Structures are given as structure tokens and as C-alpha cells.
Amino acid sequence: MPSTRVRLAVAAVAALALATPFVVRSAADAATTTQQPQASGDFTAAQVLAGIQKNSTSSTQVNTKPHINTMTRKMNVNVYQVAPGIYSYTSSMAIDDDGSDPDPDPDHQGQTTFQTSDGKQLGAHHVPFFVLGDDCWDRKSPCPHFFYKEHNIHGRQFALVFYQGKVIGAIFGDTQTANNQTTSSNDSRELGEASVKAAALLGIPSSGTTGGVDNGVTVTIFSGSSWVVNGTNSTLNNNAQAMVQKALNTLGTAMGLGGSGSPTPPPGGGLFEAETGTLSAGGTFDSNHTGFTGTGFANTANAAGAYVDIPVTVTAAGTQTLTFRYSDGSTAARPATISVNGTSHGTLNFPTTANWDTWAKASISVPLTAGTNHIRVIATTAAGDANIDSVTVS
Ligand code: GCU
Ligand code: CA
């Protein structure tokens, strides 16, 4: 169901504000937003947000007509593809208090567009969720605005939400209806609304009538079925928060943070997605087989000599173990020569897996130099490489 955050007249809002104290963020809420200690290879929220801002340029802009900031009503919100399949906008946070839980706010309604995994309405006080437009306002395809259905985004799709040094996980829970498309209120071009719980976690006043913030909230959506969050009203929040660090690492890697010219190189080791690399002619980065990490995997051409070349950055020189995550659903192993910066270090076998959705690991030790190394997986048979998902350095 559409969100119906009613915008009260200014005088009424002021009167309510006097009568209703702002919700104070509880210690428990604060704890859930505290970042875990950084493990080796982890990206911080600040690093990733800086990368998002750097990648939010006219060349990555998805919409051709601007969206409306839900709180200020200004038509100045744009959506950027900051990495393959990852979409980001910065706007207000208006407060959606829809869902199944009892709620004192007068504009509360009982239904959300999407539901929990067990079919209940999402509770805005329990589940951090964000709101997108429910149709293409212009009725055109491709939509001149950012329309989620054109971007492999589904109910409960995961997003990182950044605000004033904090980051939380949230899910796509509700939509902003177009209504009759003639008023500026409840317009599907709006962006910048999220649930009571999302606001509370970020320290934003969370009342459905007096809460919200006008600007500075960045919502970064991870598309694709592997980023849909499952759970109930009591588990969805924890399940979303449990994905935050993985999402930061996925996006940090996908944006190439830590490569040359980046603000902070990652520590030695870590996981490097194949889709940050390059392919020989005829190869593609695909996402049609499930179970990959990041935004996809490398599918080289079926030819001897076909390769994927993955940049891997370490802080110190030394011998390291490269562990490739791969899939080979064909009937024969797909051996490949592993080279580092153009020097071959032997042949690694990639035995078959049950099918193309099953992923296995194959390891080899190689010498690396400090800085960026080019790891090339070069097919030795006419079948080409196995599908390569990532390489871990340890
Ligand atoms: C199939 C499969 C691809 C794979 C290819 C191959 O087409 O879908 O992901 O790369 O086989 O044999 O290389
Ligand atoms: Ca292939």
C-alpha cells in the first residue's frame, strides 16, 4: 500500500511539536548503529560514503528528470549508479509509520506495500525500511525517473543508509503512491522517506507527524536477488544490520577504493571481486547464476587463452595464497594458468561443480608485490575459464 504521510499545515505541526516531545533515541538503538571493530580488509562507512559521493556524477546519473525531496518539496534529488547494480540518492528523511503495530500518529495506516517473509505487514517501529515511488510518473519506458522495477529491485531489497557519520542497513518496505498524479502531495516522484525505526537508528526525530530531517540522508540500494533480506518483524532489523559490513566491503571493492589514487588502501589481504577486473575479448560479467558475491562473476569466452584479470592490492610484498571462488557446471575441469603481473606461476585446476549455481574454491601460492598486482586466470583449454566469482588473498 502507498505511504500516506500527511503533511499537516505548518501551524498544526508547530502545535503538535509543543505538545509532543521528540522521541529520544534509546541506548539499545544507539548500540545497533555502532560500527563493529574494523577487521582486516574491511571498509569503513566514511570511506564508502566518500566513494559514493565521488561516483555520484552526471555520467552515472540514472534519472533524466529530477525527483522531489519529500520534506522540502524541491525537485532536486537525483539517483546515481555508483557501482554496477548499486543505486544511490541523497535526500530528506520523512517518517513513515505504516504497518501492523499500534501507532499513535493520526496518519498511520495498517498496510505496507511489502511484507515480512511470513506475510505480515512490516511494522514501521520494528523494521528499518525506505520508501520509493510506486510507478513511473511519466508512464514511459525507460522511465525518465528512477523506477525501481527497471533496476532489479524488489520488496525487502537491502540498502545502506548513511546520516551524519552513522550507517545502518534498511530494506525496501513501502512505496509512495502516485494518486491521481495531479497534486504535488503523495507523488511517486518523491524520494526521501523511511520508517520510524530507520529514523530512530540514525538519531533522526522519528515521530510520524513531527519527525524527519530535510536533507543529508544517503540511501544506497543493492539490487539483485542475493540482496533481498528475509525475516519477520522481530528479526528483519537484526538481519539487515548483519549485512552492513558485507555491503560496505562489496561496494568499497566494486568502486575500486584502495586501488591507485584512492583515499585509503585496504590492509594486506582481503577479498577482491572478479567484476572489478577486466576480461579478454568475448568475456562478460554476468549475474545469471545465483550464489555469487558482489554484483556478479566473470564468464570468459570459451577459448584457450581467454582470461579474467583481477587487480589485487596488498600493503606488503610476500608469498600469499590466492583462493579463487569459482563454478564449473560443465562436464570437464577447466584448468588455467595463473599469472601475476605477467609472470606465470603454474596451472591451477578448476574441477567441475554440481551445476553453474554451485561455487567451489581452488587455491595457489604466488609471490605478490606491495601495491596493486594483476592476477590473471588464463584458460589452457578450448572451454575457457570456469566462471570466476572472486579471489581472496590470505
Ligand atoms: C553456460 C553458463 C555460463 C558459462 C558457460 C561456459 O553458458 O551459463 O555461465 O560460462 O556455460 O560453458 O563457459
Ligand atoms: Ca564461459
Image (spheres, rainbow, N blue to C red):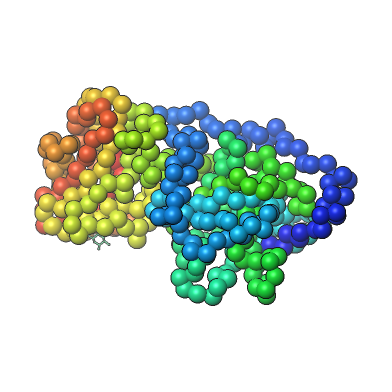
x%, y% of residue 260?
Answer: 31, 35
Depicted 364 relative to depicted 147: above or below:
above
Judge whether residue 265 can be spotted in this image. yes
Residue 218: horizontal and vertical position, in percent? Answer: 56, 47
Lateral position of residue 128 relative to residue 158, left or right: right
* 157 and 309: which is toward the camera: 309
The answer to whether residue 353 of the structure is visible from this angle is no
Hey, which quadrant is residue 156 in on the image? bottom right
User: 5 above or below 255?
Assistant: below
Left or right: 171 with respect to 293?
Answer: right
Quick check: 347 left or right of 161? left
- Seen in the picture, residue 370 relative to 238 is either above or below; the reply is above
Quarter holding the C terminus is: top left
Residue 263 location (% of width, % of height): 40, 33
Task: State the residue in front, 213 or 373.
Answer: 213
Residue found 30% across the figure and 30% down from its top: 314
Q: Is residue 102 left or right of residue 313?
A: right
Q: Residue at x 22, y 52 (%)?
A: 279
User: Could you tell me which quadrant the N terminus lies in?
Assistant: bottom right
Residue plotted at (15% across, 53% down): 306
